Image (cartoon, rainbow, N blue to C red):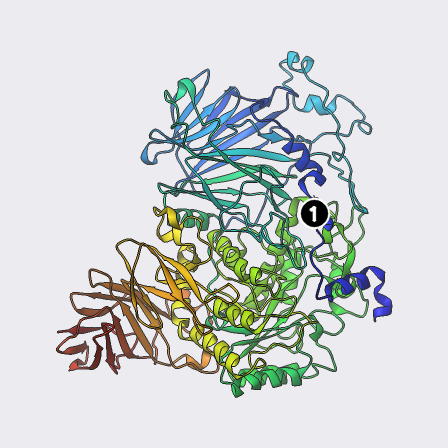
Amino acid sequence: MLARMGPVLLLWLAVCLSGSWAVDKGNFKTCDQSAFCKRQRAMKPGESPYRALLETMELTNTRLTLQLINDNNKVRLLLELYRLQGNITRVKINELKPLKPRYEVPDVLIREPSTEPLSLLSQDENGVVLSLGAESQRVIVSARPFRLDIVEGRDVLMSLNSRGLLGFEHLRMRKDTQADPEAENKEGTDPANPAETAKEEEEKVEDGMWEETFKSHTDSKPSGPSAVSLDFSLPGVEHVYGIPEHADTLKLKTTDSGDPYRLYNLDVFQYELYNPMALYGAVPVMLAHNAQRTMGIFWLNAAETWVDISSNTAGKTVFGKMLDFVQGSSETPQTDVRWISESGIIDVFLMLGPTPRDVFSQYASLTGTQAFPPLASLGYHQCRWNYNDQEDVRSVDAGFDEHDIPYDFIWLDIEHTDGKRYFTWDPHKFASPKEMLQGLLDKKRKMVAIVDPHIKVDTNYKIHNEIRSRGFYVKNKDGGDYEGWCWPGNAGYPDFTRPDMRAWWASQFAYDQYEGSMENLYTWNDMNEPSVFNGPEVTMHKDAMHESWEHRDVHNLYGLYVHRATAEGLVERSGGVERPFVLTRAFFAGSQRYGAVWTGDNAAEWDHLKISIPMCLSLGLVGISFCGADVGGFFKSPSTELLVRWYQTGAYQPFFRAHAHLDTPRREPWLFGPENTALIREAIRQRYTFLPYWYQLFYLAYHTGEPVMRPLWVEYPQDPATFALDDEFLLGRDLLVHPVTEEGARGVTAYLPGKHEVWFDIHTFQKHNGGQNLYIPVTMSSIPVFQRGGSIIPRKLRVRRSSTCMENDPYTLYVALDNQRTAEGELYIDDGHTFNYEKKELIHRKFSFANGVLSSIDLEPNAQFTTKSWVERIIILGASKPSMVTLKTADGENQLEFDFDASMSVLTIRKPGMNAGADWTVTLQ
């Protein structure tokens, strides 16, 4: 087979299999090497050629439209402004009369957003003022130069084009090919105003406008220059977050002295840390936060995008006559952001908060919420490239039982297939896949197998033949099927932007199509940026064609479409009954609706462990809660200390999977000596005890868009000490985690927020006051985790071989009292794997403790579901010793046994025994 692969793939494999290999930054463009970015970045602030033609303004009940004109070339743009429900303002800018349609991103918004009325407050020759309704919010449109400001009371919330960096490269005919040299200019002029034509300037043709070469690859750019850009000013803001995926700090850095942050889905092996290079996914959403307000900017564009960030105290926002005041003092901080995209239109949603939860809700109203995962997918996943054969799978599975370590999923990478033909099994190594899957099913465990979107070009391969015969492959610029090199060798790339292609792909997951598959087989989509080993920047040529659109227009959407089609296939195979689980490497805004993501090809290094925290926090802020990093690092081999610490960290991150490169030594949890096996076992078991809490958090994320794993500032938005923290995090509101991520650490310092709050160490029950930096001595067994006073967290302490085996096991309630001696929490239960919760087949309880009474109240009285689980123990932290404890249920009252630890103020109520779905009260007297 290797002889047929060709030199390009063999070189790539040599690179991939080299454990010492690091990213070659020369394979990926800088802004200076990306012609459109270089052109747009060369624009000078304060020289905007755009003015608003106020006489063209039209205001209806749902939108304002207004023409803008570029006084340098007389090309007109159309501005559309909408006030949307939920305190969102939408701004669209397109050419008034484009030479041909420009790409507008479909399928990302879950519906056409609902609008609310706009009303005109005032108008003169300088501009117009519109009411946004809520809390005296106004939009001020200034005419010369064009500028848009959003104001609340006397505060400027956000300004657009305040630095004059709006750029819009209009589509045009190439000068040396068009029949009428004046055609492009006539398109943008007003025929009623011949003076405009006379004033037009000849536009400069720069390198890279009509053709661009990077290394050995030439981009033909048949549509010529088409970039769009716009600047946003955020007065009073010093902290901005989001725009994943980057291996960088949670708080985004200024980019004045280097490249902008890049959003362009790329296959980057062993990426470098702390730089703005593009990685596997792109979510063009930025959050801005200060102690008074949280806001968001959603730039809906799927082309290559660069984001510049600057922060200074010069050039503060002023409005002149129209606002009748000068904004702030000279010390007021301000962050300026500029978005630059290669093609498409400007379509931006300004999410005005004002709270973090409001912004999450606003973004969720546009792109949807995190898919509610099957409960088992929140357990532990065991993976490597590759488990060799069915006997290897059986042996690893047995090893977990032998060492009393729970797990839910074992994974198969690309070597399980017949010659990298996806939807197949190696006929020698995996000759009886159903037998293998049944063996796992008998233990209530599951498997994930990889299905990548590059298809081996092989006339003996059914999948390839069907895609080719249906015309479903992406085309090259000359109209033939686009082909590139990937794991199978020469490969075609299905056009997932086509609904008919996605429907066909989904149909291939049916049990009668995907031979050897069963209901406990789930899917992993890798390499879906898409990865093309011999393509420019290891991806698809931008002039490849998706029907009538160039790949440059849709690039960042490709991975989302692969993820979507796969998830829909898993749903369809069960007749719409079962929830899917699909992991993706590439993603975009809206990918949260289809499953989980991970941070890609990391390395077994301490800094890669540390960076997993801000990377997942950044994803959670923009809707993608189901995030994790390869435990232990994909490349290289971790020390035992690093491996243990990574398990301890991963156990408290949403997606918990160990994974390793083909070339690394085996690292199943029991291969590092009994002491380390015990430490890893304990970390994984802690994960399983908290599964009820994880499941409840994902149910909340599904309903609200709130992140599962969140930065401290989300819950403590007025505490500046939290704004840049990214070495600790919250799970929901109630668990604070500060993993040990330093080699040889003997202690960590955790910031416990909330001046009037208390926090309890979950291991020792030690009580600590909030609003302090707490030094915590650590040993190798330490995982610093704290439960917030005022919370109630249900746990299952009887850990079994998989989550499904624990379905009917009892709960222990951990009641952590606040300074007012109150607490509350929730419990969510359903069948764990179907969509029946949508039909109210669920249990959702609220626990409250006040005045010495703990009660369970039904939050869904119309729901229908029963559970065999019961409450076997209640542990109250920060308690006083009662004289008597009484349980009251529908069956009557009875006294309960209890123990009280006076030294720690911990009350343990034993064997209350009530059903987890019932109404009850426990009274302390």
Q: Is residue 839 visible?
A: no
Q: Position of residue 534 (x, y in %)?
A: 78, 55
Question: Which residue is nearer to you in this view: 9 or 745?
Answer: 745
- Residue that badge 1 annotates: 551
Does 124 sit left or right of 532 as displayed? left
With 203 as the anchor, is 684 left or right in this view? left
Quadrant where the N terminus sits is bottom right
**On screen, residue 784 above or below 705:** below
Residue 381: percent from the left, percent from the top? Answer: 54, 73
As displayed, is residue 283 above or below residue 681?
Answer: above
> Residue 98 placed where, x, y %?
65, 31
Specify whether residue 757 is in view: yes
Q: Quadrant of residue 255?
A: top right
Q: Residue at x 37, y 77 (%)?
A: 796
Which residue is situated farthest in the right direction here?
A: 3
Q: Secondary structure at mark 1?
A: helix
| Amino acid, disc 1 | His
Number of marks drawn:
1
Q: Residue at x 64, y 53 (%)?
A: 558
Q: Residues within 10 Å of mark 1 (few under 14, many from 20)?
A: many
Which is more toward the observer, 179 or 768? 768
- The residue under the point 81% across, 52% down is 480
Q: Nearer the viewer, residue 278 or 802?
A: 278
Farthest residue to the bottom: give it.
Answer: 402
Q: Position of residue 557 (x, y in %)?
A: 62, 51
